[in-house]
Amino acid sequence: MPQLGRTRKTIGESHAMQAGFVTIILMVGLLCACKSEMTKIPPADVPIFGAKRLIAREYGPGGYKLTYSSTTEMEQVMEFYKQQMVLFHWELTAGVEDQAKGHMFYYKKKRRLLNLHFIARDEGIGCRFIIAETGG
């Protein structure tokens, strides 16, 4: 009989270990899901200029901000976005062109807001551009 009690305790311990193991698997799954969501940034309907290098990435509640550097002239990068945003059904709501501070364009699509900011590089070759999106 003493062995039976021991067996029940072992079975109870086994169930606790299994429950702990399942909890760990679920937590890892959630972390992986969160990470895979981050890899979807930017979404497929936000065009990304080809000749660029990602230099900063920020995520926050309801949005993200990506900063790129390119050796392509700013005017050429801006022209790419002017054409591509229309193809991806983004509506231009405002634009500010200021040589000293850079050029900013604001787009909307359903309940989303997207900001494009273009800044000429100090070296005079290429530009930096920032893509920031928030919910509307």
Image (tube, rainbow, N blue to C red):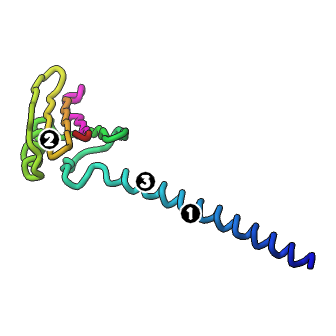
| Left or right placement of residue 61 versus residue 128 in this view | right
What residue do we see at 19% from left, 39% from top? 113
Of labels 3 and 1, the one closer to you: 1
State the separation of the CA atoms marked 3 and 1.
15 Å
Few, some or many residues within 10 Å of mark 1 (<14, 14–19, 20+): few
Name the foreground residue: 102 vs 34.
Answer: 34
Q: Which residues are magenta?
A: 121-133
Three-letter amino acid code at disc 1? Answer: Ile
Q: Residue 41: x, y in percent?
A: 31, 50
| Left or right placement of residue 11 versus residue 60 in this view | right
Of the numbered discs in the image, which one, if any, rests on residue 132? none
Three-letter amino acid code at disc 2? Answer: Lys
Q: Is residue 60 above or below residue 39?
A: above
Three-letter amino acid code at disc 3? Answer: Lys
Of the numbered discs in the image, which one, if any, rests on residue 25? 1
Q: Residue 77: x, y in percent?
A: 14, 41
Q: Assign a secondary structure to mark 2.
A: strand
- Which residue is tagged 2? 108
Q: Assign a secondary structure to mark 3.
A: helix
Marks counted in the figure total 3
Q: Is residue 34 magenta?
A: no
Q: Earlier in the sequence, mark 2 or mark 1?
A: 1
State the separation of the CA atoms marked 2 and 1.
39 Å
Few, some or many residues within 10 Å of mark 2 (<14, 14–19, 20+): some
Q: Is residue 122 magenta?
A: yes
What residue do we see at 9% from left, 30% from top? 95
